[in-house]
Image (cartoon, coloured by chain):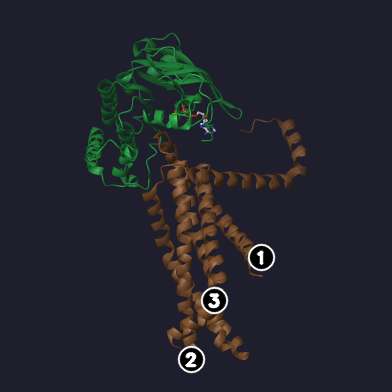
Amino acid sequence: MARHNLYDSEDEISEKTPKIPFRHLKSFFLEVSLITSFSFEFFRQLFRKGFEFSETAKQSYKIGYNSLPLVAITGFIMGLVLTMQSQPTLKNFGAEAWLPAMVGVSLIREIGPVITALICAGKSGSGIGAELASMKVTEQIDAMEVSGTNPFKYLVVTRVVASMLMIPVLAVFADAIGIFGSYIGVNLYGDISFRLFIVQVFEKVEFMDIFPAFIKTFFFGFAIGIIGTYKGYNAENGTEGVGYSANSSVVIASLLIFIIDLMAVQITSLFSY
Amino acid sequence: MDRNTEVAVPEKRTSVNDDFAVEIQHLKKSFGDLHVLKDVNLTVRKGENLVVLGKSGSGKSVLIKCLVQLIEPDEGKLVILGNDVSAISNDELNVLRKKIGFLFQSAALYDSMTVRENLEFPLRDQKKLSAQDKENLVLEALKSVGLSKAIDKMPAELSGGMRKRLGLARTLILKPEIILYDEPTTGLDPVTAKDISKLILEVQKKNKTSSIIITHDMQCARITANRIVVFKDGYCVAEGTYNELENADDPWVRSFFQ
Ligand SMILES: Nc1ncnc2c1ncn2[C@@H]1O[C@H](COP(=O)(O)OP(=O)(O)OP(=O)(O)O)[C@@H](O)[C@H]1O
Ligand SMILES: [Mg+2]
């Protein structure tokens, strides 16, 4: 709709040029406020009657099943590599016996949850974003709405809940596989029985290692679900918008995961000392 | 839809005349600078098929989307089955929407579901229906559009015309009181198009439905229309039966019928 004449557009440029940084800032805050109100809407709809159980189960299965192999492989490699890299240093200090405990703590506290969340942001977050965006631009969401089904409940609430349920499960799974990887790593240097290894790992892992790490995975799951559904639900510009939604879901969700992680460590340290 | 749920409802039955299924008064809608609907006044009587003609991009799809509140109109009053659409709550709107069938121009099939699941979707919260009833409705709907063999296919495996017919079957399955058809025969061969037009007529006779049929297919208009309105530049510029408009004074209106 380029209907401006020459003078109009010149006016517009001279008026708008100095504002450009503010405009970016403005659109950033606008986006933040939109995502926030989208989250509020999620909680409002979550507690209204008529929860879509079977659809939530289906989405949970999908998220879990899709990410399981990737999470398993990365978890295993992380445990193995972490062990192999720390072993020489710890040996220099004569603290080799601490190896299982150290790897266990790092896996459970940080690496398991964060790696799992990042993988799921890439795999499920982009999938949710692309799926909802393509439903949006091909009027499928409109079709649901006119058929008297609440699309927000059916599409958004189910996916966010599914991702909040599955990310913690996958993270625990990643921890377990990672510890197993670490066991393999330790065995490259010497012989240790699996039982002794596990005892050594959990000797130093405390409740305050496990509990906050577990809690933060719910928030990771929430971030992945909300961002994916928000981006998909508000897709525009036809098929071009689908790619954009998938892509920006991953980018924003990954960023949020690190921000949540940072906040989690601050909050945890408040309680630990 | 960010519709306000807590609006007061002064009087729900605002229709002066219970003979009307749909009343549209002074409907206006713009997208930015683009004034699509400038002042639309329309009524559909109960049991009537109203055909809407107009050039591509003249706002016909926008009109029926306003009716079901997929697009929020800027101004105007919409009364459907005695309910003022802009004054009712979300829940009441959902109840009303179940009485309205909407055939999307793009068919809008659920890509992740099979043909069967697509048809079962509108039946989801019909608790009165047993599984067997639902199955029968699905088979009947598929048969009426000639797609019985496609029941276990995915929408992506269907041809354009088959998608359109499936969309139609999904619209008809709940036997709505009002049906809004957006180009029901576009993309179909003349023979199938004629069958579909006859089906629309049959549905009208059998279920006493009131319909708005948007079409560019004059054969469909001739078969289905009780009355025709012609759209131009955001206004209804002509109204009448097929024969009346075919012999209209305005050469622009006449040109649709050649
Ligand atoms: N969501 C929207 N946002 C902005 N503009 C829109 C939107 N929907 C429709 N329009 C514009 O409104 C005008 C009318 O569109 P509409 O789809 O109603 O046309 P139509 O009469 O159905 O045409 P056709 O016969 O080709 O389907 C078009 O110019 C279109 O660009
Ligand atoms: Mg149209």
Q: Position of residue B103 (x, y in %)?
A: 37, 32
In the rendering, what colour is chain B? green
Question: Do callouts 3 and 1 mark residues in contact (Cβ within 8 Å)?
Answer: no
Give the residue at mark 3: A205
Q: Quadrant of the N terminus of chain A?
A: top right
Report the Cα–Cα distance between label 3 and label 1: 19 Å
Q: Quadrant of residue A219?
A: bottom right
Depicted A150 relative to depicted B220: above or below: below
Question: Do callouts 3 and 2 mark residues in contact (Cβ within 8 Å)?
Answer: no
Local crowd size for mark 3, using a 10 Å CA cut-off: few (<14), some (14–19), many (≥20): some
Local crowd size for mark 2, using a 10 Å CA cut-off: few (<14), some (14–19), many (≥20): few
Residue B108 - label: none
Give the residue at mark 2: A190
Q: Chain of mark 2?
A: A
**B4 left or right, relative to A30:** left
Q: Quadrant of residue B18?
A: top left
Residue A270 - label: 1
Say yes or no: labels 3 and 2 on the same chain: yes
Q: Secondary structure at mark 3?
A: loop
Q: Is residue B242 visible?
A: yes
In the rendering, what colour is chain A? brown
Depicted A123 relative to depicted A28: above or below: below
From the image, state whether disc 2 or disc 1 is nearer to you. 1
